[in-house]
Image (cartoon, grey):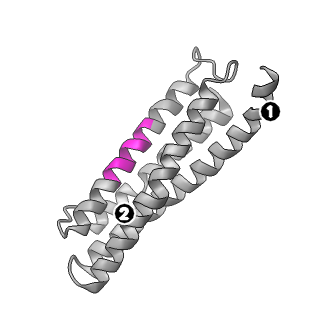
């Protein structure tokens, strides 16, 4: 690696890790908010408005920017020469899992919008089940990067 890249690499990696932590925290918490919103609060009234605002801010002020930062710093790492050996399986399993995580993110944003409009089509039980998706994907991602199978 060049001298400049050698200096920048640990900073990019650190910001990538911080972005991932922020994104994952939001991905874990937002489905729980939606569970309580659909089961306990209902889709009308002042408490509905409060939950809608909390869900919207979590999705658009924290989760969205965290995902974009995760992708930006992650792509910087991927394109750093000598870091990723694409002949191995792990970068492909990680890439597919991150794409799936992004798809889950988009699904959550759409769920927030529907619930905010009072048009929830997903039950609390279904949100509970969906809440396991980021956990499973995180396991695959971490094992891929650390074990490098």
Q: Mark 2 — residue?
A: 128
Query: In front: 3, or 83?
Result: 3
**Mark 1 → mark 2, Cα distance in angstroms:** 43 Å
Percent position of residue 92, x then y: 51, 25
Q: Residue furthest front?
A: 4
Percent position of residue 55, x then y: 38, 67
Q: Residue furthest top?
A: 87
Badge number at residue 7:
1
Dot placed on the residue nearer the N-terminal end, 1 or 2:
1
**Which residue is rendered at x = 44% and y = 52% of the image?**
64
Q: Residues within 10 Å of mark 1 (few under 14, many from 20)?
A: few
Badge number at residue 98:
none
Q: Is residue 135 visible?
A: no
**Which residue is rendered at x = 58% and y = 14% of the image?**
87
Q: Is residue 103 left or right of residue 94?
A: left
Q: Is residue 26 above or below residue 85?
A: below
Q: Secondary structure at mark 1?
A: helix
Q: Secondary structure at mark 2?
A: helix
Boundaries of the magenta span: 99-108
Q: Is residue 127 magenta?
A: no
**Which residue is rendered at x = 36% and y = 72% of the image?**
53
Percent position of residue 140, x then y: 53, 39
Q: Is residue 110 left or right of residue 1?
A: left
Percent position of residue 37, x then y: 31, 74
């Amino acid at each position: 690696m060049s001298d400049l890249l050698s200096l920048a690499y640990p900073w990019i990696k650190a910001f990538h890790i911080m972005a991932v932590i922020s994104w994952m925290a939001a991905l874990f918490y937002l489905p729980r908010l939606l569970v309580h919103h659909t089961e306990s609060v209902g889709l009308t009234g002042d408490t509905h408005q409060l939950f809608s605002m909390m869900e919207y801010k979590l999705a658009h002020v924290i989760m969205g920017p965290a995902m974009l930062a995760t992708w930006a710093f992650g792509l910087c790492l991927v394109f750093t020469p000598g870091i990723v050996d694409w002949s191995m399986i792990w970068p492909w399993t990680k890439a597919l899992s991150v794409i799936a995580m992004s798809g889950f993110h988009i699904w959550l944003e759409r769920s927030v919008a529907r619930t905010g409009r009072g048009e929830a089509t997903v039950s609390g039980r279904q949100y509970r089940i969906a809440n396991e998706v980021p956990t499973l994907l995180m396991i695959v991602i971490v094992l891929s990067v650390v074990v490098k199978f």
